[in-house]
Image (tube, rainbow, N blue to C red):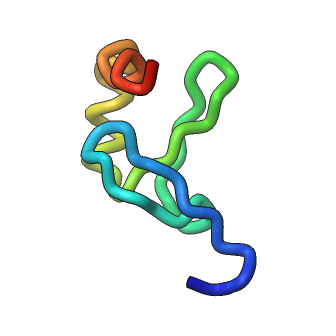
């Protein structure tokens, strides 16, 4: 990992992704990061399902 790399968790699949290179989607004022457009789509379909997992 390079300097300035911030790793964040994809809530759909659990994979760690680089926040600077990941797919992104904002929900209720929070930006979520995804490993792929497929995980982003799954999150967008039902965000509450995935946000509950983190709580």
Q: Residue at x 55, y 62 (%)?
A: 7
Residue 49, x across and y down, in percent: 30, 16
Q: Specify the quadrant that holds the C terminus.
A: top left
Question: Would you place residue 34 above or below residue 7 in this image?
Answer: above
On screen, residue 6 versus residue 12, left or right, reads: right
**Count of marks placed on residues:** 0
Extreme residue in the bottom direction: 2
In which quarter of the view is residue 28 placed?
top right
On screen, residue 40 versus residue 26, left or right, reads: left
Q: Residue at x 39, y 20 (%)?
A: 47
Extreme residue in the front direction: 55
Residue 40, x across and y down, in percent: 37, 41
Q: Nearer the viewer, residue 28 or 7?
A: 7
Residue 1, x across and y down, in percent: 56, 83
On screen, residue 46 versus residue 55, left or right, reads: left
Residue 6, x across and y down, in percent: 64, 64
Question: Would you place residue 14 above or below residue 19 in this image?
Answer: above
Q: Residue at x 56, y 23 (%)?
A: 27
In which quarter of the view is residue 16 placed?
bottom left
Question: Would you place residue 10 above or below residue 21 in this image?
Answer: above
């Amino acid at each position: 990992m390079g300097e300035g790399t911030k790793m964040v968790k994809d809530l759909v699949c659990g994979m760690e992704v680089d926040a600077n290179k990941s797919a992104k989607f904002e929900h209720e004022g929070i930006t979520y990061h995804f490993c792929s457009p497929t995980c982003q789509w799954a999150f967008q379909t039902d965000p509450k399902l995935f946000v509950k997992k983190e709580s």
